[in-house]
Image (spheres, coloured by chain):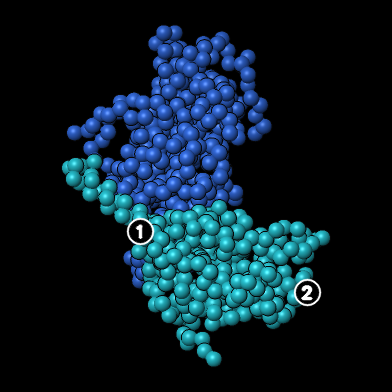
Chain colours: A blue, B cyan
Amino acid sequence: MSQIIAYTGNQIIVKAAIDAGCTFYAGYPISPSSEIAAGMAVELPKIGGVFIQMEDEIASMAAIVGASLTGRKCLTATSGPGFSLKQENIGFACMTEIPCVIVNVMRSGPSTGIPTFPGQGDLMQARWGTHGDHPIIVLVPAFHREMYDETIRAFNLSEKYRQPVILLSDEVLSQMSSRIELPDAETIIRIDREQPTEDPKQYKPYDHSKGLVPPLASFFTGYRFHVTGLTHDETGFPTENTDVAERLLSRLQRKITENLDDILKWDELMVEDAETLVVSVGSVARSAQQAVLEARERYGLKVGLFRPVTLWPFPEQALLHAAAGKQRILVVEMNEGQLALEVERVLHKSVETLLKSNGVLITPAEIKGRLLAETSLKAPVRGFAG
Amino acid sequence: MSKLAEVNYNEYLRMHRFPTTWCAGCGDGAIMKSLVRAIDEVKLDRDKTAIISGIGCSGRFSGYMDFNTLHVTHGRALAFATGMKMAYPEGKIIVVSGDGDSLAIGGNHFIHACRRNIDICLIIINNYTYGLTGGQVSPSTPLASSTPTTPYGSIEPVFDTCKLAIAAGASFVSRSVVASPLHMDKMIKAALSHKGFALVEVMSNCHVNWGRKNEFAAAAELIKHLKDRSTFSAKEAEAEGKHLLGILHQDKEKKEYSETYCEMIEKVQARVHSKGGA
């Protein structure tokens, strides 16, 4: 029997992380994510797992990478300011291909902003926050049951692709409660990183000869190997050979871009016959969904909703398909137009935006009001340089 | 006169990675050999030992040593090490760092690793400078030193690494000097044998990037200078501002962090089971 329980979003992340097989958490207190740390501090010792509150955000990111190398599934959670601090070590995990999951409960920014109010200002930071070109997977659920599923998927993708995965929540999703139905424990799919089978002496932690994702041995199991953030060859040792560097960086990108079918996820609501397409993610997409339903039901407006669930890599083809022939594209988000930038890049045209970054959730009424406005062309339209 | 312990270095080192990137005469090589001798003597299982380093010349230790090795971001080695030790408490963790890596950018992790008294052996190679980046001033550069970022002489007050570690709660704190390999061996061996956070600060020479600009351009001269600036007498160290050598603090009774955590897990699990579930 599946259970129906009332949870806050942060509690759901805790529940899902444990169900996904997470046994290690390191974190630092920050609103509005702190309940995730508190929940993990309660739950992990019960299953023999480890919780540690580190001395700062940087250390907690470092600790989960160190712990992951022993074979554990590891989690940290934070919000905007802490997410900024974690970036260097997120890049380290990308470069060294060490699985881990980072939750960012987005709050109103920039800087300290309004810590207990929601925002979506980290969509681009989640993609480009750490220096250098790097692959990343970012998931952005909008509903609580989806949050549970996407947290589990975050761990699975992380293990499967030897890749840090970022789960974006926001203050609204994380703090609100709802009753959700959880799947039976035995139906949950848990993916573990592939282990090497060869003799430890032959093991190469970045051997690309058998596939884009080399098996990752755990420390202390007899496979003595080297892990470095320096550009490295297949054996893991540093190199300044630019051909090797190119091969490595290309493989890091390709392990994501050649597995889009597996990684991408999006949701469409009444898109087929729509003349107007709303694009939105996270808690704002809940308002957008309500607005679309009401605009259809009460006013007969032909509106649909396109909602990326995998934000990065971006579901480009799906958006192109959904947006084909639509007269009007409206991007709704709690920032100054970050998602809109990506939508414009994909569609190669300017789109209409409904933006708000003052820490107040965009309401269904606001979106409906915009949908009912006579023409989109008179609404503020962003310039498109592309 | 005692002799250095005999050991087959090749067995512990990744010889295919040699020669090292270190300058001729650098103390790092002597310290790495000392670490190998100490590891050999205390008979660490290489499969169960990890060596973690950060950024700087000391950062290269991990690549040269045939263990489970991790070369991380600047200053963060102790934070990665803390995660690893907590995830695998049976493992032996050795961190090799420099004065810039540990005392400046990594200062926060240093004091908190000391405070937790987590079972990690930390070797700080204090060569007075950021050698790899060209010899800039560090928290341990002697006052009035000429460096690229203190061209008119350093006015930066200096950290006493060992006093800092003791105050922060480390249960084993020692200092040695690269001029005395036997003493280095003794200190590192004692640190590896200690349960809890164990620090060995080794005063070492960067004649190339600190010495050259401060009248010690030759390795031998700088090593002699370091020896002259070191003492086993606390009085002399205090009076003349010298580096005090030896085991400066050891508390064998202090609770070790990962063990304490494991005890807590056992208690929590016992309680959960006695209640018949979570």
Q: Position of residue A116 (x, y in %)?
A: 50, 28
Query: Quick one: SS at disc 2?
Result: loop
Q: Nearer the viewer, residue A248 or B37?
A: B37
User: In the picture shown, does residue A78 fall above or below A115?
Assistant: below
Please tell me in which quadrant of the rendered image residue A39 appears.
top left
Q: Quadrant of the N terminus of chain B?
A: bottom right
**What residue lies at 54% left-to-right and 37% top-to-bottom?**
A80
Q: Marks 2 and 1: in contact by CB < 8 Å?
A: no
Would you name the residue on which mark 1 appears? B259
Q: Chain of mark 1?
A: B
Q: Evaluate whether residue B227 shows in this view.
A: yes
Q: Amino acid at mark 1?
A: Glu
Label 1, label 2: how far apart the Cα atoms are: 48 Å
Q: Is residue B163 left or right of residue A207?
A: right
Query: Quick one: SS at disc 1?
Result: helix
User: In the picture shown, does residue B184 fall above or below B169?
Assistant: below
Please tell me in which quadrant of the rendered image residue A203 appears.
bottom left
